[in-house]
Image (tube, coloured by chain):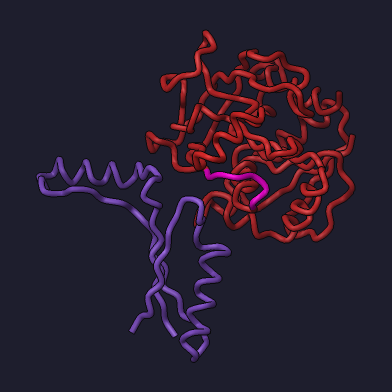
Chain colours: A red, B purple
Amino acid sequence: MKSSVIVFPGSNCDRDVAVALEKLQFKNSMIWHKETELPKSDLIVVPGGFSYGDYLRSGAIAAKSNILSEIIDAGKKGALILGICNGFQILIECGLLQGALLRNSRLKFVSKDILVKVQSNKNKFFNKYKIDEVLKLNIAHNEGNYFTDKKHLEELENNDLIPLKYCDEKGNIDLKANPNGSINNIAAIFNKNKNILGMMPHPERMTDKALSGEDGLGLFLSLIN
Amino acid sequence: MKFSVTVTLKKDVLDPQGKVVGQTLKSMGIKKLNQIRQGKFFEIDIDEKDSVKAEDQVKEMCKKLLVNQIIEDFEIKKAE
């Protein structure tokens, strides 16, 4: 499989995700945001970081980069797109995903391991996981408080478009297990066609037992499945 | 031509920053404070003499970049 990782000034998880992809034999290219052509890719990754120093709103400036019009075109044609953390914010700002990521409800940057429960596995990104499986992943963000209007929230809930929700060790999805105030404990969402995924947790940080864990590996394994 | 743009969070969007600022002011003794909402302010200078055209361009800037209309409202005012 061929993958492209998009690099913006201020991206800082681009190399981590490239290491994870290459570990699973993806043929990966790093694409600078000023490029106007995207190489043919089975997967496009918009990585985490602080593109443009989070100026204006997180992801707002990056969402106007040259390469984004290519990504939007590819996404509309069905290409697989994964936005992680700041990448999720960028996908929202450019309109590929709906809703908004607000400042964390407790106004603090949260950097820690959290638990999420798999809610959906009939898709390209989570088919290697079981429904209700609890995963330990890592989050590191200031604006991860997902918000959307009632109509869209119902659409997400009723159409299997929320693959991950924050939970506790027992798998309870409640306010206590919610690290950022995200509506309905949402940690990740799909677009309607499930080819575009935005997630606040970092799967690439959990792809090596020697470092922190392997719970994120399943996502990359699902993609090559 | 100069304009000022005020961007605020929509009424039904939680504003945790405004809330904390409000709580702090109350704890400082400003008892009559009802509510504070925090927003952003832009000063825009545009090279256009026609005020209708100029305002249209400012509106476009707001819609295309300055404002996230899902969560924010904006107000344009012509500066003297």
Q: Position of residue B29 (x, y in %)?
A: 9, 45
Q: Would you say the magenta stretch is mainly helix, strand or loop?
A: loop
Residue A52 higher or lower than A25, as above or below: below
The quarter of the rendered structure image containing the N terminus of chain A is: top right
Q: Residue at x 71, y 13 (%)?
A: A130
Q: Residue at x 81, y 43 (%)?
A: A78
Q: Residue at x 82, y 48 (%)?
A: A77
A51 vs B21, left or right, is: right
Q: Which residue reaches farthest top?
A: A170
B11 vs A5, left or right, is: left
Which of A210 and A155 lies nearest the eye of the viewer? A155
The quarter of the displayed image where residue B60 is located: bottom right
The quarter of the displayed image where residue A161 is located: top right
- Numbered range of the magenta stretch: A95-100
Which of A59 and B31 lies nearest the eye of the viewer? B31
Which of A189 and A35 lies nearest the eye of the viewer? A189
Q: Residue at x 73, y 23 (%)?
A: A126
Q: Position of residue A26 (x, y in %)?
A: 86, 33
How many tags in the picture? 0
Q: Which residue reaches farthest bottom?
A: B49
A54 in magenta = no
Residue A169 higher or lower than A56, as above or below: above
The quarter of the rendered structure image containing the C terminus of chain A is: top right
A134 vs B23, left or right, is: right
A97 in magenta = yes
Q: Position of residue A162 (x, y in %)?
A: 62, 29
Q: Position of residue A192 (x, y in %)?
A: 70, 39
